[in-house]
Structure formats: structure tokens, C-alpha cells
Amino acid sequence: MQTNNKWIDYFKKYITWIMLAINLAVILTIILTDDEYSAAFAPGQHIRPLWMAAACGIYLLSVALEGLQLKFILGRYAEKYSFWKSMRAALVTRYYSAITPACLGGQPAVLLRLISDGVQAKNAGMSVGVRVIFYQFGQLIDQLLMLLYLPRLSLTMGPVLWAALALGIVLGGALPLLLLLSLALPSWTRRGIHAVATAGHKLRLIGDTEVFCQMAEDKIAPYRDSLYRLRPMDCAWVTLLAMVQVAVLSAVAYAACLACGTHIGLIDSICRMLTLNTAVNFLPIPGGMGAAEGSFYLIFGPVVPDGRIMLALVIWRAASYLFLLLAGVAESGLYALESSLRRRKAGQ
């Protein structure tokens, strides 16, 4: 839509490219000027370039698995969406989750991408919501399995990190379990919501209990209706994909340790990364920066030699964060270019 101010029109036309240039400048500044990144690579004789590339490849594999889940769910809602587009949509989710506090930007960004690609808004919303539910459920299963292996890890975490780990499991598992409970036992769910509303009303935290119950039901109903459209085998398949995706994402640290010449075992590495991701997943920090690095140092410190722990940390963070930012910028630039070409073609 044109306005009377040509500068506003110019800004709206090129805002995407301006944001891409700013993002790229920030990434290059981090890589080229951060002394800690440069110092960490001092013991260069330990670096194995093949495993560094493998760390990035494993990360892309986790993105592909996320895209496969999205494609499968969209197919169940009668939407034809290619695997290539689904993988790019998954990359959009990761990119905006990485640059926004507490990973809040990923879901709105992928929802807009799906709608702009022609997916019906209702189906797009249901697909994104259902994928998040099953991802959280698959992650919860992995976390519970990780707890069985936890005594073998000899972790040197402080009470704050242990508390964050417990909180992450509770918060991460609450949403899928509550929604699955509401699907199986809707009458019990309504009673539970009414009990919460009554307690809140007595504590003067909630005004009208009926309005609160209706708002809660309105929030749950779309997810429940969308889950009803999936068969039990569909749910099992998506959950399995989510479990594999979480494990593959955690294996990036395994490749990072091998890249610096340290072998700690695949299962051991995956369980340590599950512990880390669970502990820092809900912190209000873009990409978990700072908390993720400190937790990595504490969790992997006992099994990685002192001279190589910082190198392993940098390689892991480069593959799981800086590589993601570069890939996200490239994908956004490609999408902006494709959109521009489509508009030109439509205008001819």
C-alpha cells in the first residue's frame, strides 16, 4: 500500500534487507572481535575440521526432522506443503527463537511464514500448536529417560542449576500433559479449571470465575479439536520424530567434543546436553546466551580436559547458535529475494 510520504514507502520496501544487514553485521562483529572466541582456538593442534563440519551437519539434521514433523501434520490437515518449505519454516522457527527472549518469537514467525505460503490460517495455527505439543511431549520422554542415566554423569552442578533442571522438566511437561489430559478426560479438566478459578477467587486473584473458566476452555478447545483430527498412530509417529529430533540436537555437543580431540561417549553427551537444555530452556535470555555457556562448562567440565573445554564450548556454540544465525539470515534473504521476484512477475 502506497502512502503520501516517499521515505515511508522506501523504508517499508527495504526494511527486510536493512534488518538482514544489521543481523549480519552483528554476527560478523561477534566472530571477528570477541577475544574469548579467538583465545579459545589457541590450542589449534586439537581441532578436527571434519567433526566441526559434522556438528553443523547434525544441527541441520535436527532442523530437517522438525520440518518433517511439520510437513506430516500439515498433510493430516489436507495442506500440501513440500519438505523443502517445511525445513525452511523450521529454520525460521529456530532463528527467531534464538534472537528473542525465552524463545517467544519462533512460533509467531513460522505462523506468518505458513500463511504467506498459502496455508489456511486455521490449519497453520493448529499445525504449529500441535507440533509444539508433541515436541514438548517427546522432549519430556527423553528427559525422563535422561533422569535414569543421570547418576552416572558425575555432574558438578550447584543448587541453582539443579533447581533450574527440575523447573524445566515441570514446565516443559506441564503443557503437553495437561492438553493430553484434557483430550482424554475433558470433564475432569473442566473440574480442575473450576477448582483453580474458585481458589483464585477466594484469594482475590480472579474476579469472575465463570469468565475465567470460559477463557480457559476457549484456549484449550482449538488444541483439543486439532488433536482429535489425528489418529493414534499419527500421534505416536510425531512423538517418535520429536524424540529423535531432541536427541539429534543434543548430539551436536558430541561432535563438538570430538572436534577438539575428546571422546566422551554418545549417550553420555546426549544426556548431558538434555540436562543443559532443560535447565536453561525457560530463561528469559535470547538463545540462552551466557547461561548456556556457563552450564556447558559446568556439565561437560568433569569429562573434558581443562585445556580443551573452552574449545569444545566454542565449537558447540558456533554450530548451535552462530551457524543458526548465519543460516537464518541466509534463509530470510533468500525468501525476501523470492518474494521480490514474485511481486515483479505479478506486476508484469
Image (cartoon, rainbow, N blue to C red):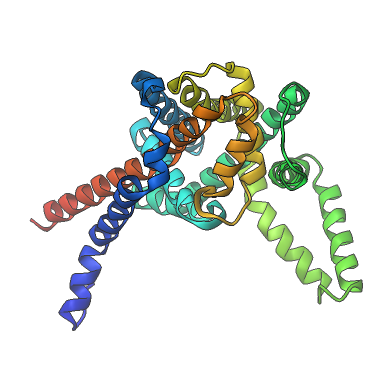
Q: Is residue 227 left or right of residue 257?
A: right
User: Which residue shows up at 52% across the image and 43% down it?
Assistant: 127
241 up-or-down from 166: above or below: above
Q: Residue furthest left?
A: 348
Q: Is residue 65 left or right of residue 231?
A: left
Query: Would you say 225 lies left or right of 145 here?
Result: left
In the displayed structure, 270 sits above or below 286; it is above
The answer to whether residue 63 of the structure is visible from this angle is yes
Q: Nearer the viewer, residue 17 or 294?
A: 294
Figure check: 109 above or below 49: below
Q: Position of residue 104 (x, y in %)?
A: 53, 55
Give residue 93's position: percent from left, percent from top: 45, 46
> Toward which corner of the image does residue 3 lie, by quadrant?
bottom left
- Total labels: the figure holds 0
Percent coordinates x, y for residue 20 in the rendering: 28, 55
Residue 229 appearing in the image? no
Residue at the far bottom: name it: 4
Work out whether residue 225 or residue 205 is closer to the camera in this orientation and state it: 205
For image coordinates 51% across by 35% down, the residue present is 73
Depicted 209 relative to depicted 187: above or below: below
Q: Quadrant of the C terminus?
A: bottom left
For residue 257, side relative to residue 233 (left or right): left
Residue 32 x/y as whole percent: 30, 46
Q: Splitting the image into 4 quarters, where does residue 296 fall?
A: top right
Nearer to the camera, 189 or 262:
262
**In this orientation, which residue lies closer to the viewer: 187 or 147?**
147
Query: Considering the image in quadrants, where does the N terminus appear?
Result: bottom left
